[in-house]
Image (cartoon, rainbow, N blue to C red):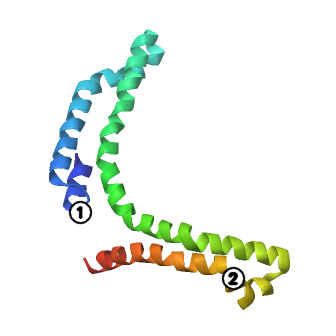
Amino acid sequence: MVIAFLFARLTLLSLARAGRNSTLSATIFLSGGIVGTLHHLYFSGTPTMVLARGSVFSALEVVPLLFVGQPAALRLLEPERRVLAMVVISLLPVGLMQTWAAVEYGYRYARTPEFLQRGVIDLFRWLRVVGDTIFAPGTSRSCCS
């Protein structure tokens, strides 16, 4: 519940979602908390079925954290997805082609105009505009807000 409150104050999570997640957390903790402690009774000769139920309810205690953390993580990772698009569309293919050329013909050839102005390299250079266009609005929003 504290994490939901902090994420809501940081505007990483809406107040409505924080409230729903706090209710879900309280329900899971209150309904499963007593049963969840039964997995600690291993050495007292508790039947296996009771230990199994206790283990399941004990493992369910982290589920509310996933519901709270998932939307916050998506919001924080949004700019990284834009950078990933730019890298995958342009920088990675050109870098791999340059690496191949450097291994095959030497580093000097991989940096020459004959290599860098080939049709396929020009295509990937222009495809970079797509990633840059997607990336640019995110940088202006994150630096100016």
x 46%, y 17%: residue: 42
Q: Residue at x 20, y 48 (%)?
A: 17
Q: Earlier in the sequence, mark 1 or mark 2?
A: 1
Kind of element beneath mark 1: loop
Above-or-below relation of 32 to 136: above
Residue 51 occupies quadrant? top left
**Residue at horizontal 29%, vertical 47%?**
68
Q: Nearer the viewer, residue 51 or 18?
A: 18
Kindly identify the amino acid type of the residue bearing the numbered disc 1.
Leu
Q: Is 4 left, or right, of 88 in this rendering?
A: left
Distance Cα–Cα, label 1 vs label 2: 48 Å
Question: Which quadrant, please, contains the N terminus?
Answer: top left
Q: Which residue is mark 2?
A: 118
Residue in front for this viewpoint, 32 or 101: 101
In front of the other: label 1 or label 2?
Answer: 2
Image-based side of 101 in relation to 52, left or right: right
Q: Which residue is mark 1?
A: 10
The reply, left or right, for residue 103 in relation to residue 118 is right
Q: Callout 2 environment at 10 Å: few (<14), some (14 to 19), or many (20+)?
A: few
- The amino acid pointed to by label 2 is Arg
Q: Hey, which quadrant is residue 132 in on the image?
A: bottom left
Residue at 26% in and 31% down: 28
Q: Is residue 71 above or below residue 108?
A: above
Residue 45 position, x and y percent, is: 46, 10
